[in-house]
Amino acid sequence: MPKPLHIITPVKDSYETAAGSIRAIKESDLPPSCSYTIYNDFSTASNKKLLEELTLELGFDLVHLEDLTTNPSPNYRLVLQLAQKKALEAGADLMIIESDVYIKQDTIKKMQAACAELDNPGMVAAVTVDESGVVNFPYLYASSYPSSIIKTRKRLSFCCSILSNSLLSAYDFKFLDPDKSWFDVFISHKSRKLGFNNYLITKLPVLHRPHSSRPWKQLKYSRPWKYYFLKILKQRDKI
């Protein structure tokens, strides 16, 4: 029997992309026992207003992180802590669908069912593809994998993933390193260290438009020397 599901999407500007992602989620086959929360991570005032209008149209919980912290974006650590608390209170698994990911009609229900059936899952993730259906970042290592559900020792991404209630119960996100910006690599490895299995679902691809909310990260692919220079100089994008 699948557990209830708490779904979240962190948002930082890039409204058109984020709105498309949110709309795809709300118009998909959502299980009855689920909640959906958007965490607005210091978007501009105009994009904040657009998100508020969107929640009136589609119906989701909207949390403005500026009401909770003065720490500048990215605030993924705080998002994970808030979402973990809410999921544990509901006895739910936590599903993260990032704002540059577009799911299909049945993505959520199929991933929820897989998480319920798999052996001792910690993280369960859907592989990401581009508009042509070709596996893209961050799963380039899986480009030759068969269409299946694969237990993996490789790191998983939060792009479209479920963190099981068991994993949430086993590790308190208050211990996440406050000096880091992103935590999917750490948590996917932590899951395995705690004895859980991680799975990548290659037969359930989702469209990924990488880093639409943080365009400077596109430099990683076009001008990597500049990306790493800025990363070191400005102390950002810490994994």
Image: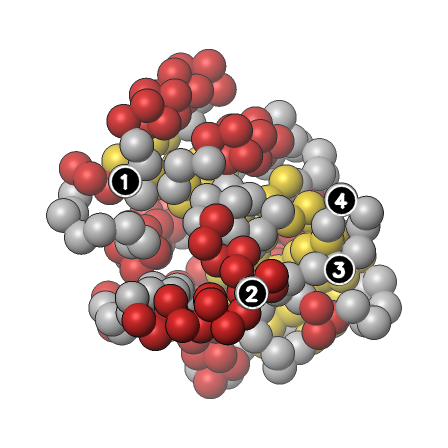
* Label 3 to label 4: alpha-carbon separation: 10 Å
Which residue is under mark 4?
A: 131
- Which residue occupies the extreme left position in the image? 70
Name which of mark 1 and mark 3 comes first in the sequence. Answer: 1
Dots 4, 2 in contact, CB < 8 A: no
Is 134 situated above or below 46?
A: below
**Along the polypeptide, which appears first: circle 3 or circle 2?**
3
Q: Is residue 115 left or right of residue 55?
A: right
Q: Which residue is mark 1?
A: 42
* Residue 154 visible in this rendered orientation of the protein: yes
Report which quarter residue 140 is drawn in: bottom right
Q: Secondary structure at mark 1?
A: loop
Identified at 81% across, 47% down, the residue is 132
Q: How is the image coloured?
A: secondary structure
Amino acid type, label 2: Arg
The kind of residue tagged 3 is Val
102 or 112: nearer the viewer: 102
Assign the C terminus to one quadrant of the image: bottom left
Q: Which residue is mark 2?
A: 223
Residue 135's label in the rendered image is 3
